[in-house]
Amino acid sequence: MPSWNIHTAHVERLLSQETPAALGIRDVNAFLFGNLAPDVYVGYMVPDPTRKIGYRETHFADPGYVPEPRYGEFFECWVAPYADADGRVTDVMLGAWTHLVADHVYNSHFNRLLDERGLKPGTEIRIRKQSDFATFGRTLNISMVPEATPELIEQCAAFPQYAIAEQDVRAACEVMAGIVRDNVEHHVDDPNYSLLGGDYFSRVPDELDALMRDALHAYAAGDPTWGRQR
């Protein structure tokens, strides 16, 4: 799965190419946090969260070997029904959708790669995949860290699928600050991948950026179908 440094890098890439308004984003800080939100309660990113929620519920996917979140189902269940009269949703909800899109794109390409190479899932493949993703994450230059502003805390409390407690919002922001520091201190300029190779980590991120950009343009233009599975 993409880690938070990868999710953050995609936010930064989008915002380096587009204005927030062109993407329908009103609160960049809340959108950034939304890109972390589905992982807050799964139990492995935020230490000692106030509760845990199963992966099937947070990501709309069976937590199998390499799950492919059904972001279109999330959109139909928890985004579209809560849009206002102008078709707008909170930026936390918008960011949560892009998080699931990212997980889906990276993991579906990984599963396809295994099929093409005739590789069977197992412990060795999982370890090599995790190592490659960790290496790739450290090649990224990231600097954005969400802040637990009153506006963000309010949006998280109102997140319709499950409220995100203020304590957990603050803890997640602290975790992200540590990830940014780690990326700076352990930056990798010449990555050596064990399984996936440089082509995967150039082709897949570009495809993901294009998918998210197109969908967010549609959202900004008021298209009510913007978040459906593509």
Image (tube, helix red, strand yellow):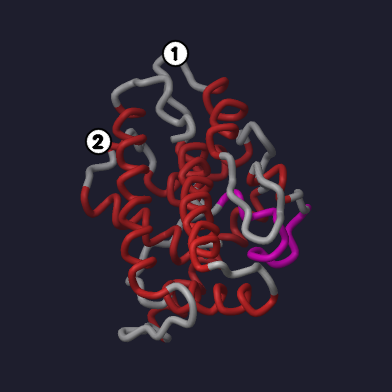
Which segment is the magenta one? 37-51
Which residue is label 2 attached to? Answer: 22
Mark 1: amino acid: Ala
Q: CA distance from mark 1 to mark 2?
A: 19 Å
Pick out the residue farthest to the top.
85
Residue 201 in the image: above or below residue 21: below
Residue 97 in the image: above or below residue 169: above
Q: Position of residue 87 (x, y in %)?
A: 42, 20
Residue 83 in the image: above or below residue 94: above
Is residue 180 a member of the stretch shown in magenta?
Answer: no
Q: Which residue is painted at 54% across and 31% down in the image?
A: 75
Is residue 42 a member of the stretch shown in magenta?
Answer: yes
216 or 152, which lies in front? 216
Badge 2 marks a residue whose secondary structure is helix
Mark 2: amino acid: Ala
Q: What mark, if any, has residue 69 been given in the picture?
A: none
Residue 67 in the image: above or below residue 127: above
Which residue is label 1 attached to? Answer: 85
Q: Main secondary structure of the magenta part?
A: loop
40 or 76, which lies in front? 76
